[in-house]
Image (cartoon, helix red, strand yellow):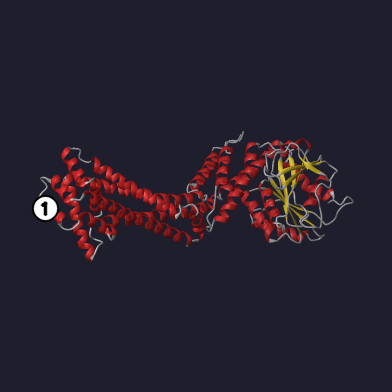
Amino acid sequence: MSNVAPALDELRRTLSAARFPLRCPGAQEGTETSIELAQQIDDYLLPRYTSLDAPLLAVVGGSTGAGKSLLVNSLVREHVARSSAIRPTTRDPLLVHAVEDGAWFSSERILPGLARLSRSRGTSQVVPDPLSQAGEPGASSLELVQSPAVPHGLAILDSPDIDSVVEANRRLAGQLLAAADMWIFVTTAARYSDAIPWKLLAEAASRNIVLGVVVNRMPAGTQREILPDLAKHLDKEGLGSVPIFTVTEYKDEDGLIPQAELAPLREWLLSLAASAASRAAVARQTLEGATNALLLRESDVVNALEQQAAAALRMKEEVAAAFARSRGTVEVSFEDGTLLRGEVLARWQEVVGTGEWMRKLESGVSSVRDRIAGWLRIQRQASSASAVDLAVEDSLLNSLVSTAEEAIANVELQWASRTESAEVAEFAALRLRSSEEREVDAAEAVRQWQRDLVEMVSSTGKDKKTTARLLAVGVNVVGAALMVVIFASTAGLTGAELAVAGGTAVAAQRVLEAVFGDDAVRKMTARAREDLSEKTAHFFEKDADSLLAAVDQYGINIDGPANVTASFAAVRDALRTEQWQ
């Protein structure tokens, strides 16, 4: 068994897994090329690398009305292929093989996507081949006919027209020609210079396939004019050594091309299939040419995959940038005083009241427990402190939700502005949490932060004096004071709010210092800010992760280019060390 086969099998799997869901410029070509190459590996390269001794498959191809089916019938001296003036005649391809070679073609060894049908000689009835498991219901079928006129080691396949008006027939013709060991290309004296046949012959030259050209319906006396011109065309395409066979317009009494006219073509075919060595030489020539031609098309797939990966990475970078800006915006709001606006300031003023707090605190803290106990009306201030909590919760919640939705809107706008990502924007929108869910999650994040803050206040400083001071002031009041200190910058405030915030921030700082001391207050403030930053980041991550997941769920494989490149490289490496058994 060839050591190239495992590498080709892996390449086939990689190509089959390639996806081009984004509407990038190369998406269509990438899709078609990856399918075509995977199909060729399945249909021809793998089967031939794993069984070099299998019969040669000669595919008869050509344009509409060139006389392909008549040629097949005439070679086997029997009307096995349908020949008609109605186009297209050949819809399901017909494969004629030697009696002893049936097992090679009834299995899935080649063309595994085509269901097998068998037909007994001398009848027109076809039935599913009982030994075949190939193909799927509704797919094109491969009709198998055995004939004693076909020599052992050779099979002849009558394919659909390469220029059929039916697109499916054109695709199938290309698939069959790609699965051939050799081509018998049929044209006519009137149409040999048409563009479509020459495009296909150029492909034959690129693959170094074993090729014979049959010129059908050659009018008497025109060979000296037509054959040199045809030879010139072939030489220009690098096919100067290709044999040319001519057939006149005459038919014998059986409606077949006379045997004498087909003798040169028949002898050429017999010489190629005469021995295992000659068959192997033909197979190796075509196989190596086909493999090299396949490797040359790597860039067609990789470039298209790179476009997909680049577009996906750009989308992900836009998500990361949008939510980084959101986190930055919220982080700034923690420090610029904007979260102390309005309701928060008003509620904190209810706690500290007039300037009495400042005067009392400035008189000293040596008996702070007694003084604080006298200064505060505990119930009123605890209630006001709870109002501060609610005001902070509302302020933070609104900030988180509005900033997250702004980030989402920016990402969706960027994606929708480009053809390749517009559909992903619609796809992603369906996977984001709703506005209501976002508000619930924001509220829970803020409340959990507040709970953790109160827990930190309660657990800081376990000595008796600190505990007594904390109880005298009240945990809720101290917690409210800590929140004010955390957000206590006046950079974003002006006018009356500036004066109020400045005074109340100092009051909150003095309360905390009176209870815990300077160093503890600094540590508590830093820890609470860090905790809030972490919870904020986690809140934003939920939307960011949904957008990033939508890119992945859309079927884009960012590693696709690297995977395909590695698989092609593995085939090249295997070819360099190939040793035929």
Residue 164, located in which quarter of the rendered image? bottom right
In this view, 127 is above or below 205: above
Q: Position of residue 295 (x, y in %)?
A: 56, 47
Q: Residue at x 58, y 49 (%)?
A: 34
Q: Please tell me which residue lies in front, 152 or 376.
A: 376
Mark 1 highlights which residue?
A: 362
Give how far across and how far down residue 37 sits, in percent: 60, 48
**Quadrant occupied by the N terminus:** top right
Q: Disc 1 on helix, strand or loop? A: helix
Residue 434 lies left or right of residue 33; in this view the side is left
The amino acid pointed to by label 1 is: Glu
Counting every numbered tag in the picture gives 1
User: Where 38 sits versus 28, above or below?
Assistant: above
Q: Residue furthest right?
A: 253
Q: Nearer the viewer, residue 16 or 51?
A: 16
Percent coordinates x, y for residue 420 in the rendering = 51, 58
Task: Give the residue displayed 58% in from the left and 48% down from the top.
Answer: 294
Residue appearing at x 49%, y 57% in the figure: 425
Name which quarter of the figure residue 136 lies in: top right
Decide if residue 512 is on the left or right side of residue 164.
left
Q: In which quadrant will I find the C terminus?
A: top right
Q: Position of residue 16 (x, y in %)?
A: 58, 46
Q: Confirm whether residue 156 shows in the render.
A: yes
Viewed as shown, does residue 257 lie left or right of 10?
Answer: right
Mark 1 crowdedness (10 Å alpha carbons): few <14, some 14-19, many ≥20: few
